[in-house]
């Protein structure tokens, strides 16, 4: 990495830490630390939700999947776009209103407990355990992405790069909580968007236009030009099913809860979905163009100069040793060192914006749902904030240890955690908001069955039947919740009245 690139990169990191320090001064209680006092505007909420959602997956995982498999891998993007729109359209407004009506709930487990008047705290505890389990894997995926960035950019060893990335990310989350996370996500969302637009345009131009790119990829493998060719129905269903995950992602749902008003939802939805669709297009084009660029023998010298490893793939075609590094390679090879520094910062932005949100939701599960609810019911607000902060460090450490294998895949780790939340929480969130008859036991058994299905299916069924585990988990969670609720005792009048009050607002 050149000096100019390095300086630009460092300036960006300092800027993120300054935002963390500024937010630290505005964080005085647990509601501030976990939910920012419910004062996010639509632009910040939308870009923050998008940035925390997409993560390093959008700049590393998805381009890598397209680079390795062609346009058939783009079905994931289609499913995600549909799922995100439906989440903003049907869940965002109701959740914002209902969480405030239900005793001003500030976390997803908090909402479940208040929604069902669960004085036993078991629903809160089980929900928090699910969050800690799957977010540890999700956070680990971000650590892997960060390590790949530092490894490729600075020539560091994988483990060394892993620790440096982790320290940077933990620092400002530890300090500023939700406001730091949301403000940095807003900046990072803009940076990611500009990077995803610029990189494929410059790369296509470098290769002589879109027609030349299509011809080059067709010469390598014609099936990579077709979204359907060579892809079975099961694979398409699995890819599209990623969209189901949105309804249960705690780090996205908290952005809805943090909006300053339910009336901001339409504007936030427009900003968020526009950002997302254009970003997905940019990621898909980056991976697609990358295949043509790397395969051209004339570009080998430029790639090698920046330390990008090129190997012989099937049929003697030149390929990157790690497909998930294609965006990093383009950033270094095609741009001026200062712009390259900004683009590399955009990749780190994508990674940081998700990890910080996941760490925050996990730490809130420890502080609000374990420490306060079970261990110290009279804990002070300041005490809870510090419990949350120390939880950030502990959870991040476990995630780093999980990410220690250099062969770890960003996409693989993300898909497991995404399925966990979508399968365990998605149907329960939807039913909680739309069905008055859902009971505490229905929600509890639904969450347990959904989470267990993801784990069991991934370990025992996926190797022989390649259907993404979110599909059976989502269906079984919803069915169990409905059946148990129908045979259970009817919800109390108090719960029904609160449901009607939330609906009326």
Image (spheres, rainbow, N blue to C red):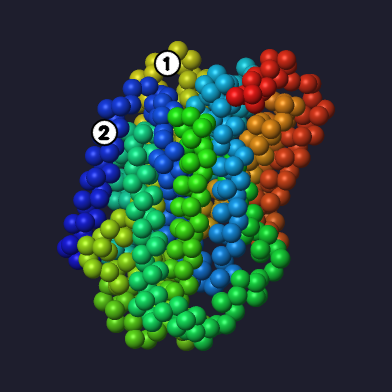
Residue at (38% x, 82% y) in the render: 208
Is 433 above or below relative to 413? above
- Residue 443 is situated, as x and y percent measured from the top left of the image, at 68, 31
Q: Which residue is mark 1?
A: 379
Q: Which residue is mark 2?
A: 22
Q: Is residue 444 visible?
A: yes
Residue at (53% x, 57% y) in the render: 412
Give the side of residue 69 with respect to residue 6, left or right: right
Residue nearest the viewer, comparing 458 with 504: 504
Quadrant of the snapshot with the C terminus: top right
Kind of element beneath mark 1: loop
Quadrant of the snapshot with the N terminus: bottom left
Residue at (26% x, 41% y) in the render: 17
- Residue 408 is situated, as x and y percent measured from the top left of the image, at 46, 59
Give the side of residue 123 with respect to residue 167, left or right: right
Q: Is residue 115 visible?
A: no
Could you classify mark 1 by the number of other residues whose Cα lies within 10 Å: few (under 14), some (14-19), or many (20 or more)?
Answer: some
Which numbered disc, 1 or 2, marks the residue that appears first in the sequence?
2
Residue furthest toward the left? 3
- Residue 424 is situated, as x and y percent measured from the top left of the image, at 63, 40
CB under 8 Å between discs 1 and 2 = no
Residue at (49% x, 26% y) in the render: 106
Is 176 above or below relative to 28? below
Q: Quadrant of residue 48?
A: top left
| Real-space CA distance between mark 1 and mark 2, rounded to the nearest whole angstrom | 25 Å
Residue nearest the viewer, comparing 496 with 64: 496
């Amino acid at each position: 990495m050149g000096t100019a690139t390095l300086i630009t990169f460092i300036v960006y990191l300092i800027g993120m830490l300054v935002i963390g320090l500024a937010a630290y001064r505005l964080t005085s209680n647990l509601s501030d630390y976990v939910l920012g006092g419910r004062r996010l505007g639509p632009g910040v909420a939308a870009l923050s939700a998008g940035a925390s959602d997409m993560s390093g997956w959008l700049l590393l995982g998805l381009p890598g999947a397209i680079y390795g498999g062609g346009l058939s891998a783009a079905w994931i993007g289609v499913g995600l776009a549909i799922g995100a729109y439906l989440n903003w359209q049907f869940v965002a407004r109701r959740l914002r209103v209902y969480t405030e009506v239900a005793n001003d709930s500030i976390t997803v487990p908090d909402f479940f407990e208040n929604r069902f008047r669960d004085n036993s705290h078991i629903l809160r505890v089980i929900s928090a355990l699910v969050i800690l389990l799957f977010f540890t894997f999700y956070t680990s995926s971000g650590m892997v992405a960060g390590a790949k960035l530092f490894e490729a950019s600075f020539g560091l060893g994988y483990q060394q790069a892993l620790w440096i990335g982790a320290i940077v990310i933990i620092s400002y989350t530890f300090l500023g909580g939700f406001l730091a996370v949301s403000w940095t996500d807003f900046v990072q969302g803009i940076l990611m968007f500009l990077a995803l637009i610029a990189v494929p345009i410059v790369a296509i131009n470098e290769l002589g236009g879109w027609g030349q790119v299509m011809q080059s990829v067709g010469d390598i493998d014609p099936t990579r030009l077709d979204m359907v060719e060579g892809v079975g129905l099961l694979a398409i269903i699995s890819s599209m099913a990623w969209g189901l995950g949105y309804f249960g992602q705690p780090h996205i749902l908290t952005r809805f809860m943090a909006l300053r008003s339910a009336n901001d939802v339409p504007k936030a939805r427009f900003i968020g979905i526009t950002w997302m669709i254009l970003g997905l297009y940019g990621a898909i084009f980056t991976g697609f163009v990358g295949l043509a660029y790397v395969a051209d023998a004339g570009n080998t010298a430029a790639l090698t100069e920046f330390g990008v490893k090129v190997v012989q793939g099937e049929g003697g075609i030149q390929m990157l040793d790690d497909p998930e590094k294609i965006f990093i390679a383009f950033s270094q090879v095609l741009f001026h060192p200062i712009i390259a520094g900004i683009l590399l910062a955009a990749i780190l932005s994508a990674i940081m914006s998700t990890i910080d949100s996941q760490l925050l939701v996990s730490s809130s599960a420890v502080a609000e749902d374990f420490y306060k609810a079970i261990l110290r019911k009279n804990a002070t607000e300041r005490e809870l904030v510090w419990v949350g902060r120390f939880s950030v460090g502990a959870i991040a450490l476990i995630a780093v240890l999980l990410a220690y294998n250099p062969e770890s895949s960003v996409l693989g780790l993300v898909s497991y955690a995404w399925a966990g939340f979508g399968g365990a929480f998605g149907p329960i969130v939807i039913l909680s908001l739309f069905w008055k008859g859902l009971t505490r036991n229905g929600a509890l058994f639904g969450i347990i069955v959904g989470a267990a299905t993801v784990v069991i299916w991934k370990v025992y069924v996926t190797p022989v039947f390649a259907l993404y585990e979110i599909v059976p988990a989502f269906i079984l969670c919803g069915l169990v919740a409905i059946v148990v609720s129908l045979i259970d005792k009817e919800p109390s009048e108090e719960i029904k009245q609160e449901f009607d009050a939330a609906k009326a607002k």
